[in-house]
Amino acid sequence: MSDAPEKKAPRKATPRTEMPVQPPFVRIQNYLEVAVGYTEADAKAEAARCLQCKKPLCRQGCPVEIDIKGFIGALQKGDLPGSYKVLRDYNSLPAVCGRVCPQETQCEGMCVLSKNAEKTGGPVAIGRLERYVADTFAARVADGDAACLQITGEAACRMMRDDLKVACIGAGPASLTVTGYLAALGIKVTVFEALHEVGGVLVYGIPEFRLPKGIVRREVDAMKDLGVEFKTNWVGGKAFTVQELMDQGYKAVFIGVGAGLPQFMKVPGENSIGVFSANEYLTRVNLGRAYDFPNYDTPIFKADEVCVVGGGNVAMDAARTALRLGAKKVSIVYRRTKAEMPARLEELEHAIEEGVQLELLNAPLALNADENKRLVSMTVQKMQLGEPDASGRRRPEPIEGQTAEIPCQLVIIAVGTKPNPILLEATKGLGLNKWGYIDANPETGETSIHNVFAGGDIVTGAATVISAMGAGRKAAKEIAKRLLGLDA
Ligand code: FAD
Ligand code: SF4
């Protein structure tokens, strides 16, 4: 039998419903969310585009296998609580995923309407609908809507089994998925987080203008209502070990500590005043709320001319943050071309609209400082693209003798991260791969230690929110199977 959907795309193309956004000249002067969100009419129009395929390919593109047809189908019938319930059955962070997931390469990339986009109007805007359902549901709960409260109430009524304790280390999307899944089954979960806020990169990395922190807090509060305990300022490997948790009666431990240790470029001048890792820069602004000066007095380095090195989402976030903090010129320095940039297309387009400049085919050679060690410029090597490398992307090669100098007083380095060794070194018997990440069974998430699981960036290296959640879901299913005897 073929996988082709049985319904055909409508003959007359209905274009995707645009996401309303703040105009670029307005949004670079504030820190509010860029994408404003669908209205009820927008959501209705977009949901109506879904063909309700008999074999919905969209679902195959989702790492947590959301019943996309189901949640959009309920929305088509005007059943918002029902739509939310379908979403929550698969995804404990729908408002987050609706905002930051790379849908274009996942569910939307697989949607039958993504083929022949000029005729079909393009794939159903699944992420925008997911966000609409999650946000509208939350607003209705806040307004005391009975049908919505019944759904949240049903979940909260489940009895917690104190004899079945599970610990999660780290409170990013991987652990939060394990937590949401197990708590819904009545398993008592305690989450140990090194920072003073829960959410991982969702709170310290991704800026407010893409993902308001109130949304993460809302999802975390829903887990607290289920009985989950969050212990912040607890550093695994220093304050406690995995073995100590097992000795305290935790039946399983999930390690979701991410890969937050920044990498540097190893070029001369990298320790000059005015050089930051994107991790530190964004953490100061997001977690330390430096953008909200003087209400918060976290120090942040400001400059007129800023260079951000890298081509991923982290580089885009750092560049757009620097603009909002008042920089006159922000340039992204990247050694390949726009086509090879790993950032989400939408984020790249938003950055360009806001005035971020692209210095493509340039690789930093040196960071130059004045006699006071203050950064004044970056020397770059001009590059060209050669043959594809192991990743399939064309390899950047230096053009001999061609260099240039870019004036800048602040450089933000976003060239990747690696695992923080604190917990890994303190956990005896934990198998690591040759890159230093945890070796975990791809089907169950179990590590070399029985009943100790791992998932997310600490296993795969820096990836995406939804892939971390997919790993969390697999591990949670296995833990539930072992603890409850359920093939949940
Ligand atoms: P993390 O989110 O890194 O969470 C790990 C948590 O563990 C942290 O809170 C950390 O403090 C804590 N921790 C670390 N060590 C310890 C310890 N020893 N003890 C206790 N706690 C510890 N992905 C997308 O899909 N879309 C995007 O638009 C996107 N944008 C991004 C922008 C930025 C700036 C960054 C940095 C990443 C972005 N990503 C994006 C990637 C995505 O956020 C990550 O892949 C995802 O958060 C990984 O989840 P995780 O749960 O594995 O780890
Ligand atoms: Fe079909 Fe796309 Fe609707 Fe999924 S979202 S059911 S693939 S039309």
Image (tube, grey):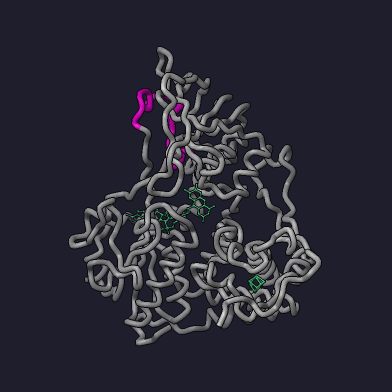
Evaluate whether residue 74 shows in this view.
no
Q: Residue at x 36, y 85 (%)?
A: 484
Q: Quadrant of residue 453?
A: bottom left
- Left/right placement of residue 401 relative to residue 26 reads left
- Left/right placement of residue 408 relative to residue 35 reads left
403 above or below 10? above
Q: Residue at x 39, y 56 (%)?
A: 457
Rendered-image quarter of ligand 1: bottom left
Q: Quadrant of residue 271?
A: top left
206 above or below 326? below
Q: Residue at x 40, y 77 (%)?
A: 477
Q: Depth check: give the residue in front, 123 or 371.
A: 123
22 above or below 136? above
Q: Position of residue 221 (x, y in %)?
A: 53, 66
Tell me which segment is drawn in magenta: 266-281
Count up the numbered dots: 0
Q: Position of residue 243 (x, y in %)?
A: 22, 66
